[in-house]
Amino acid sequence: MKIRIKFSKHGCMKFIGHLDIMRYFQKAHIRAGLDMAYSEGFNPHQIMSFAAPLGVGLTSDGEYLDINVKSTESSKVSIEKLNKVMVEGMHILEYKKLPDDAKKSMSLVSAADYYVYPKSQEHGLSNQLTEQISSFLNQDEILVTKKTKKSEKTMDIKPYIYDFSIKNYSSCQEEVENLPAYFLSLATGSETNIKPELVLKAFYEFIGEEFQEAWFQIHRQEVYTTSDGKFVTLGSLGEDIE
Amino acid sequence: MRKLALSDEILLSVEKPARYIGNEVNSAKKDLKDIDIRFCMCFPDVYEIGMSHLGIQILYDMFNRRPDTYCERVYSPWPDLGNIMKEKNIPLFALESQDPVKDFDFLGITIQYEMCYTNILQILDLSQIPMLAKDRTIEDPIVIGGGPCSYNPEPIADFFDLFYIGEGEVVYDELLDLYKECKKKGMSRRDMLIEMAKIPSIYVPMLYDVKYKEDGTILSFTPNVEGIPSTVEKSIVMDTSKIGYPAHPIVPFIKATQDRVTLEIQRGCIRGCRFCQAGMLYRPTRERDVEELKAIAKEMIESTGHEEISLSSLSSSDYSHLKELIDFLIENFEKKGVNISLPSLRIDAFSLDIMSKVQDIRKSSLTFAPEAGTQRMRNVINKGLTEEIILEGAGMAFEGGWQKVKLYFMLGLPSETEDDIKGIPQLAEKIAERYYEIPKDQRNGKCNITISTSFFVPKPFTPFQWAPMCTKDEFLGRAKLVNDTMKEQLNKKSMKYNWHHADVTILEGILARGDRKIAKSLLRAYELGCVFDAWDEYFDVNKWNQAFAETGIDQDFYTTRVRNEDEIFPWDFISCGVTKRFLYNEFMRSKEEVVTPNCRAKCSGCGVLKYKGGVCVENKN
């Protein structure tokens, strides 16, 4: 039985990389007493996959992890059991059953929402940014240079920016309230993956400044897939277990 | 949320920031309002090594059971962060609260190997605690050393306020209670240390004076205040049900060197190998109750979620209930996806049967530790393994489908001859021959024999504590002889030979049997930039040679010198239960190439019978 788990990652947990988060969940499943399904072979391992790996340094309220279980309790009980064995900064938000023919979440991801907010007041966002953002977005094309391991290539990222605006961000875990932040909705996934810092670098260049990455906290809010031409959250493909 | 000691910017600029953030599963969280004593436990090496150490988990668990004590952890910052902290003057902090170590009541440092000594200095330096105990005030934490190297604490005695000699479960409660009392009375640091020195097993170096003879050896070693003992006795837990057990060990986020549950099945070893320090220090052998171990294993898996469990002891094959325990583990955990990793067992029908159940035969290898190449040499070191046993075990294994063998030896053992050295590759050759006796159509290609040698370092509290060590050139010449001999053999293509660097061995030799005079060389080496000496990429022999030269230390005095029977060793004021007389007799027996039976076969009167327990009283009631 396939299960999709949604979780958040805050505080010092942002320093734990993707592979270690995977190991963390393998152990958490056992501590929570989930009836995990294992692969065949001499070294059986839990069958699990993540939707979109989150970079070190980022926080999130929209991480997805798919696991296989042999049997399960209700969503409510499972969430409680998992949250009991989480560390500070990790929290389980959803536990949903997927249809048996569900595709791996990794192949489904098409977009993600981000908040990018200043870590200290002295770097707060100015009022004129809204206007500057709209002229940035009004360009015919937004060319950036993407570096890969082998080469550099120039691409137009404009079609992949679905939203870019200023919104207020609040998070009790990060002790932030109504803080003006950049909001970005960007193409994400194996085909096209646009990182928020790439867009912000281009934007700051556009307004003649330098983007100081260290001043900002990047936070992923949600991850989406496309269904009937619309973005729906990855979690909405599953159903709560009663 | 907790505030971290390091900024995001620093954490994102260093390798593996997870080393410095704490917050791991099962780590302790306490409110400072509720506690009286802050204890910081330190393993002076990188996080992944330190987190793999069972001893710290035992003590951490034990301290945190006390409602009045909050025990936290600290490890050596990797040089990338170490340099930043030094440059920006950031004080070293404990992982749990992220508070500076210098604000704690105690800093306890476990000393597992000599090559971490400069890391100890780095810990003190980065913590902004005066490096020398004599310069510390009541504001500074009390710096405690423990672990195997504390059985010769002299080279590092100047840096510690006190050493705890022996097993941690015994007198720590007493020490902490006394600390609270002294603090209440407003005692001075020195008076407090004098009171502490009266607790058995507590050694306060500044309360003892050493006088030297003209030749540099020790003339006398005596307390300089009244009422403290001239001999410090080790602590030992004789009721094994009272051996501490962390049923909820900390689970690191990043992969530690030992990423698994470790089950300590016994302490001590019955074998009595003459080179082995642990085999003497931890006598007598004490087994843990198998039913208790089963329950602990279950609880540990459930509390950590680890998917692997391994057994810990000096010689697991000697544990009387090994079969019962392993059968239990296989039956209960295999189905649940928990791997069972076996310690090095004696290779026989029983262990091969178990190994075939829990490992992939094609991938796993057999490990033998003959330690020496000839029977003569094995008699000298009292290693009971014979060539017959090795070939029989290997033969059985080869017929069962194994084809990889690892062999461990030592080079530079006392009285070693050319024949003994050549015997190492020759034994490997015999094992290879045994493999190729299997008909071609029944075997699986080539066999794969790895020979590894380490260079022998005489250690305190072993029969070889009197023995001179080889020089660097002698060591390397012997390794070359092994290599050359191997290359002339018929089956050389089935063999691979690994040996170690000799420079680091010489340093280990100096530090292992060093005295208080060494401290100034250590300080100088640290000033010159030596740290992480256990790591090849950081070990710099030139700096060490410079440090010894500048501080007037003759290295040969500590390594190649022949010691007389009646020499007073720097560690003689410590009693580990085994008598110096027994050790010397064993040294003499080694010269006669006479084997001494193991503790279960026959008592050899080593002295630990006085503890009235463990193997000494087995079947005697």
Image (spheres, grey):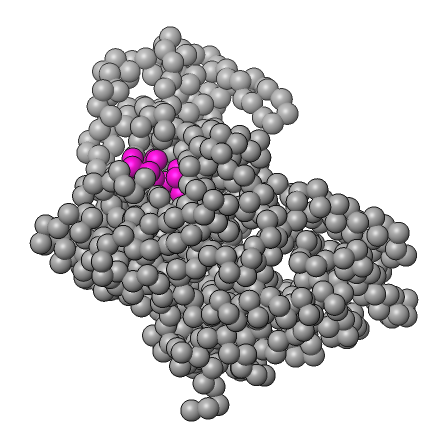
Identity of the residue drawn at 19% across and 31% down: A178
Image quarter hosting the C terminus of chain A: bottom left
Whether residue B511 is visible to the viewer of this picture, yes or no, is: yes
Residue at the outermost left position? B185
Identity of the residue drawn at 67% across and 73% down: B594
Q: Is residue B277 above or below residue A87?
A: below
Q: Depth check: give the residue in front, B250 or B307.
A: B250
Residue at the outermost front position? B214
When asked about the image quadrant of residue B465, the answer is bottom right
Identity of the residue drawn at 19% across and 53% down: B192
Image location (x, y in percent) of residue A189: 51, 37
Image location (x, y in percent) of residue A34: 42, 65
Q: Depth check: give the residue in front, A225 or B313.
A: B313
Q: Is residue A20 left or right of residue A148?
A: left
Q: Depth check: give the residue in front, B586 or B360.
A: B586
- Span colored in magenta: B118-131
Q: Is residue B425 above or below residue A19?
A: below
When asked about the image quadrant of residue B417, the answer is bottom right
When asked about the image quadrant of residue A181, the answer is top left
Q: Is residue B286 above or below residue B554?
A: below
Whether residue B331 is visible to the viewer of this picture, yes or no, is: no
